[in-house]
Image (cartoon, rainbow, N blue to C red):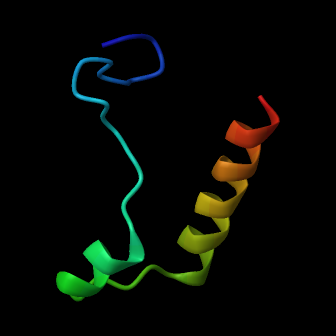
Amino acid sequence: MNQRAEDLLMGAPSTVEDKQLKELNIQLSAKAKQALADAQNEDQAA
């Protein structure tokens, strides 16, 4: 674990694919989808 609450050995937390969410019948709220998109944009900018 590091100060960003990441487990570097396990790669957790990691993003999940839409396919995985559909398999478990999980739907993200609009707010969660926006937060995910914002986080991905921050990762790409770094």
Residue 24 image-quadrant placement: bottom left
Outermost residue, left side:
24
Height in image: 25 above or below 12? below
Q: Tell how many labels.
A: 0
Check the picture and name the quadrant holding the N terminus: top left
Residue placed at 65% from the left, 50% from the top?
A: 40
Quarter residue 12 falls in: top left
Q: Which of 24 and 4 is in front in this view?
A: 24
Residue depicted at x 34% and y 39%: 13
Q: Residue at x 31, y 30 (%)?
A: 11
The image shows residue 20, relative to residue 7, as above or below, that is: below
Please name the residue shown 60% across and 82% down the image: 30
How far across and down, in percent of the image, does residue 34 sit? 67, 69
Q: Where is residue 38 in the image (x, y as percent from the top left)?
A: 72, 55
Instruction: State which quarter of the image contains the C terminus.
Output: top right
Residue 16 image offset from top left, x and y in percent: 36, 60
Q: Which residue lies furthest to the top in this view?
A: 2
Q: Is residue 38 shown above or below 43?
A: below
Horizontal side, residue 21 vs residue 42: left or right: left
Q: Please state if 43 lies on the left or on the right of 21 as rendered.
A: right
44 w.r.t. 28: above or below: above
